[in-house]
């Protein structure tokens, strides 16, 4: 906004810089063997990353510099830093360990580049703002660190073997560059009657994080993975129901219930083609009615012959 103080406009960028510092600090913690502090630093960077954009929109302090700074900070905090932490922790003794780290960093950068290009795409449907394309980089980094988090909570096991860590890291990288839709929290609206239960849930979650931080983080990552099928289903449903694009969630639920109650579903292409064939047969029958014969299209006749187990052959 034109009348805002320079310090207010600088606040979102300051939070982005703090996220960058937290991400880089995780590498220093890993080099000194403090892996719990490394995970905590990247988690803090993810929290800062979720705040800077919201704060910029709230204060009307968005800028091109802030957007570019945010992308660069994400590439370091959620690409370079997790890759180095995983390499130092469990991949340094493997021949393919550095390759896995490079693959992860490249996928994070590609994901951020695609995100920036989609911001300028005016051809996206209106409901696309409710989704991300692929897993965002902050949860993607925490997903990649899941073997380390589980090891900090349960100790070493098969999940901490170099092969398991390598495969899991590559899978997390592929999820970020995939086309799988994931829910965006930017458009979530909490109804007034759900505010008190939500606050109680936040208190319970905070108590769990304080008492069992690594178990809570592992559970959160598993729940995030579990939401991917629902996000894909919701995206597909919205794509098939344009009438629900601009309505609130309550009305969308009503549309879904009414469609389910009436048994409505999209017609299949085979059924449409079959209906066209039958209509064509009726037209030809009327055309040949004067001659006292029933005319069936060649395609329908061949399909009828296949159903009866007949095949073409020469005339005797």
Image: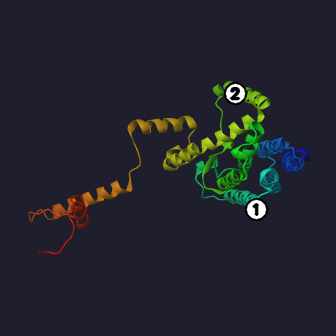
Q: Position of residue 186 (x, y in %)?
A: 69, 43
Q: Which residue is mark 2?
A: 201
Q: Quadrant of the C terminus?
A: bottom left
State the image quarter where residue 114 is shown. Answer: bottom right
Report the number of numbered marks.
Answer: 2
Using the image, tell me which numbered label, if any, was put on residue 95.
1
Return the residue nearer the eye: 216 or 292: 216
Q: Position of residue 214 (x, y in %)?
A: 76, 37
Q: Is residue 258 above or below residue 117?
A: above
Dot 1 falls on a residue whose secondary structure is: loop
Return the residue nearer the eye: 217 or 301: 217
Q: Position of residue 196 (x, y in %)?
A: 69, 24
Q: Residue at x 48, y 38 (%)?
A: 256
CB-based contact (under 8 Å), mark 1 and mark 2: no
Q: Earlier in the sequence, mark 1 or mark 2?
A: 1
State the image quarter where residue 83 is shown. Answer: bottom right
> Badge 2, how many Cα within 10 Å: few under 14, some, many 20+?
few
> Badge 1, how many Cα within 10 Å: few under 14, some, many 20+?
few
Q: CA distance from mark 1 to mark 2?
A: 45 Å
Q: Is residue 208 left or right of residue 270?
A: right
Q: Residue at x 63, y 56 (%)?
A: 178
Asked whether residue 47 is in view, the answer is yes
């Amino acid at each position: 906004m034109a009348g805002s103080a320079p310090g207010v406009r600088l606040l979102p960028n300051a939070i982005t810089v703090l996220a960058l510092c937290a991400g880089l600090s995780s590498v220093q913690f890993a080099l000194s063997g403090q892996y719990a502090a490394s995970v905590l630093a990247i988690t803090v960077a993810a929290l800062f990353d979720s705040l800077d954009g919201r704060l910029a929109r709230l204060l009307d302090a968005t800028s091109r510099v802030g957007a570019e700074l945010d992308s660069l900070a994400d590439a370091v905090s959620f690409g370079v830093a997790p890759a180095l932490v995983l390499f130092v922790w469990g991949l340094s003794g493997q021949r393919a360990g550095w390759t896995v780290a490079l693959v992860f960093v490249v996928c994070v950068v590609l994901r951020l580049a695609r995100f920036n290009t989609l911001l300028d795409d005016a051809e996206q449907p209106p409901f696309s703002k409710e989704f991300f394309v692929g897993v965002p980089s902050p949860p993607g980094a925490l997903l990649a660190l899941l073997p380390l988090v589980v090891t900090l909570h349960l100790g070493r096991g098969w999940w901490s073997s170099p092969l398991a860590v390598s495969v899991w890291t590559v899978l997390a990288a592929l999820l970020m560059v995939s086309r799988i839709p994931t829910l965006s929290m930017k458009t979530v609206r909490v109804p007034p009657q759900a505010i008190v239960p939500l606050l109680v849930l936040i208190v319970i979650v905070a108590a769990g994080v304080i008492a069992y931080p690594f178990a809570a983080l592992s559970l959160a990552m598993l729940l995030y993975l579990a939401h991917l099928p629902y996000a894909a289903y919701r995206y597909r449903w919205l794509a098939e129901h344009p009438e629900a694009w601009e309505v609130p969630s309550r009305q969308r639920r009503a549309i879904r219930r009414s469609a389910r109650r009436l048994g409505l579903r999209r017609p299949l292409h085979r059924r449409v083609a079959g209906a066209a064939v039958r209509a064509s047969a009726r037209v030809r029958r009327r055309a040949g009615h004067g001659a006292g014969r029933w005319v069936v299209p060649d395609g329908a006749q061949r399909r009828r012959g296949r159903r009866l187990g007949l095949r073409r052959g020469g005339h005797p």
